[in-house]
């Protein structure tokens, strides 16, 4: 604990990511072993969904000395201007419609070079499956991933260049998901969520955005709603919404200074995050080959 507190904040951000990944992998092994008793049911998904919140608890305990004075402020769980709910909605809809084709494009490229594209088997046979999946795959990831990435980690980069910090968190957020197919989509999403959090001064709008995106995927899948993500009209609508989202961040509370130009420090984040990044790379390569 003392070692973590002795580090500079950017270094601590990177180390926290490495610790997060180690705990996440260890807990995933344990919980997936337990969940294997329920393969083919939604309970498998529910048990596996506990990995991220339990990992967050472990990371929070490790960082308790640095967050005990103001845990909610450190995690950016605080009030925000309700107008950012509009920004959150614009971002989730814009990403889903405007860039929803990215994952398919990457998957096709991976398949073309002879590698395996991992597929997620989500059980959505009944209304109960649907409701439980919303809790396990939409709400839990939205809350706890945002608390880690846009809360704890991004908070430690508050003195660094804003753009470089958002890019750094976007990279590790995308790699955390362990999927090359989703990397580019998750990276862009991760960066946008960082800017939304910084401008609103709260992680709550990012949680809302994250939840809406996950909820939409599950809902459209359950109700067999088909969207042609390659339709020029759909893409145009999505990109327009993203542009409006960007404009909303620029003009909402326009007099607030949100860009920090200190270029030092972010490299330390990558250095201390290197073990976690390597672990992510191993998981991604394993998923492509096995």
Image (cartoon, grey):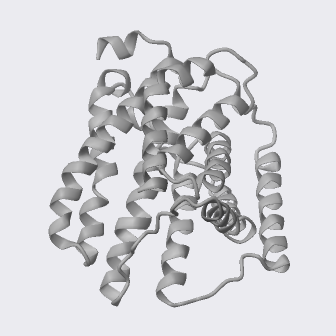
Residue drawn 28% across and 76% down? 42
- When the figure is inspected, residue 226 is found, relative to residue 180, above or below; the finding is below
Query: In the rendered image, which quarter is residue 282 located in?
Result: top left
- When the figure is inspected, residue 72 is found, relative to residue 262, above or below; the finding is below
Q: Nearer the viewer, residue 113 or 101?
A: 113
Spot occupied by residue 10 in the image (x, y as percentages of width and height): 54, 20
Q: Can residue 66 be seen? A: yes
Spot occupied by residue 38 in the image (x, y as percentages of width and height): 18, 72
In the image, is 77 to the left or to the right of 22?
Answer: right
Q: Can residue 74 be seen? A: no
The quarter in which the N terminus is drawn is: top left
Q: Nearer the viewer, residue 121 or 88?
A: 121
Spot occupied by residue 4 in the image (x, y as percentages of width and height): 37, 16
- When the figure is inspected, residue 50 is found, relative to residue 233, above or below; the finding is above
Spot occupied by residue 87 in the image (x, y as percentages of width and height): 69, 58
Residue drawn 28% across and 50% down? 28
The quarter in which the C terminus is drawn is: bottom left
Q: Nearer the viewer, residue 203 or 135?
A: 135
Q: Residue furthest front?
A: 114
Q: Residue furthest top?
A: 6
Residue drawn 68% across and 50% down? 188
In the image, is 270 to the left or to the right of 45?
Answer: right
């Amino acid at each position: 604990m003392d070692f973590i507190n002795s580090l500079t904040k950017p270094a601590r951000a990177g180390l926290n990511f490495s610790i997060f990944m180690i705990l996440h992998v260890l807990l995933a092994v344990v919980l997936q072993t337990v969940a294997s008793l329920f393969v083919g049911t939604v309970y498998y998904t529910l048990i596996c969904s506990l990995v991220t919140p339990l990992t967050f608890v472990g990371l929070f305990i490790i960082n308790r000395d640095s967050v005990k004075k103001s845990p909610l402020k450190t995690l950016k769980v605080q009030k925000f201007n309700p107008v950012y709910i509009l920004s959150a909605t614009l971002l989730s809809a814009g990403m889903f419609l405007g860039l929803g084709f990215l994952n398919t494009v990457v998957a096709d490229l991976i398949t073309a070079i002879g590698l395996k594209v991992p597929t997620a088997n989500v059980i959505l046979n009944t209304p109960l499956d649907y409701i439980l999946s919303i809790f396990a795959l939409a709400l839990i990831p939205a809350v706890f991933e945002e608390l880690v990435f846009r809360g704890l980690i991004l908070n430690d980069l508050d003195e660094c260049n804003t753009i470089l910090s958002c890019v750094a968190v976007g990279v590790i957020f995308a790699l955390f998901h362990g999927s090359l197919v989703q990397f580019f989509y998750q990276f862009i999403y991760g960066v946008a969520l960082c800017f939304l959090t910084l401008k609103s001064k709260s992680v709550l709008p990012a949680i809302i955005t994250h939840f809406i995106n996950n909820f939409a995927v599950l809902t459209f899948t359950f109700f067999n709603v088909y969207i042609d993500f390659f339709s020029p009209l759909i893409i145009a609508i999505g990109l327009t919404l993203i542009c409006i989202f960007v404009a909303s961040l620029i003009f909402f509370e326009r007099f607030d200074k949100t860009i920090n130009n200190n270029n030092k420090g972010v490299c330390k984040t990558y250095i201390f995050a290197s073990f976690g990044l390597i672990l992510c790379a191993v998981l991604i390569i394993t998923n492509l080959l096995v």
